[in-house]
Amino acid sequence: MRRLRLLCPLLRLHILLLLAQHRSPTDIADWLFCSRSSVYEVAACWRQGWRPGRVEVTAETDSVLLLAPSLRRSLLALLARPPAAEGWQRTRWSCASLALSLHARRGLQVSAETVRRWLHQLGWRWKRAKLVAKDKDPERVPKLARIRLIWETLRPREALLFADELDIHLLPKSGYQWMPQGTQVEVMTPGKNQKHYLAGAWDSHTGVVHHCCGSRKTNQLFRDLLDALTRHYPARFYDRVYVVVDNYKIHKAQAVERWLAAQPRFHLLWLPTYCPRANPIERIFGDVHDKVTRNHKRKRLSDLVADVDRYLHQHGPWPYQLSTTYQEPTITTMLKELQRTQQVA
């Protein structure tokens, strides 16, 4: 049996029997290979009225209660509902409110710390929520179906790339990191914030990211990226290059349209509005923030930009797949219609 502190019934019973023989806590800890604090806790629980085999749990003895299957189902059912459904005037569950709701539902009194341990056993963690915009583009399904069709039917002399822009701030992004308990790591701010921008395109076949940098986030930055793609995908090897972009204004500028008219091999595919999950390069840019820009200590923007450039060159390729957004039933149905249309044509 696992001897995790007081969770093992045999360990608790053994401690009680040795205490009944007036053994010292030090001797008991040596004989049973446990800590003296475990001996003290068992003795304190005994004085508070706990007896082996009882179901009742007090605040002092709640650590002996295991997460039974029925209790697991009750806890998950609470987590699946908003706190307001249980009468709480709050938007998020806390360990204390979950403990009180379990007491109201099942008459089981446990502490907030016990609920916290149960949540960790269930694989739940206390993290920040992510803000997402509502995906309500009326052309959402046709756009995603067309991208998926090209992904699945890409020919040897064709390339499919997903492009986007990355903002690089000298002011560091704060994030979690390991630090001693009771302390908090300080990240000095450089003063006035400065910005630089990176435009990148991820190749869905090779997993390589092609990128360029600029001081302004304009259509010139996007055209510089397209110029770089013409060098990496020359006409003697590629007949058609698809570039998937979002609906940001620099992608629709007249200068970009003139560039595309002069380069008929390149075709832009549009993502639905407010649908970043459909762009795999967002995951790469998220890695860049986690590994390079978060909690950084650079004092000069040029050094930070060089770090980002070095990370993209030295890491990868990124063999990502399309997200589950492309596998929705409505998109699959539209994909079949597009395939039938192509066969008829």
Image (spheres, rainbow, N blue to C red):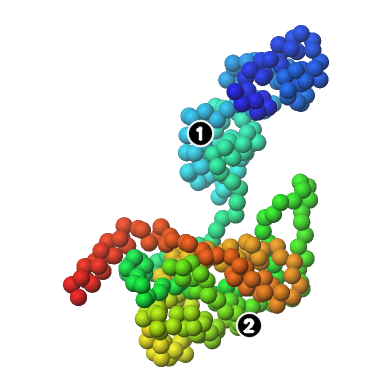
How far apart in space, not on screen, are marks 1 and 2 (Cα)? 53 Å
Q: Is residue 107 left or right of residue 5?
A: left
Q: Find residue 122 and report its image quarter.
A: top right
Please tell me which residue lies in front, 236 or 330: 236
Amino acid carrying mark 1 in the image? Arg
Give how far across and how far down residue 183 sits, in percent: 78, 51
- Residue 180, compared with residue 44, is above or below; it is below
Q: Is residue 174 above or below residue 9?
A: below
Residue 219 image position (x, y, % from top left): 52, 85
Q: Quadrant of residue 64?
A: top right
Residue at horizontal 79%, vertical 12%? Answer: 23
Amino acid type, label 2: Ser
Q: Which residue is mark 1?
A: 72
Q: Residues within 10 Å of mark 2 (few under 14, many from 20)?
A: few
On residue 215, which mark appears?
A: 2
The residue closer to the viewer here, 5 or 93, is 5
Mark toward the start of the polypeptide (1 vs 2): 1
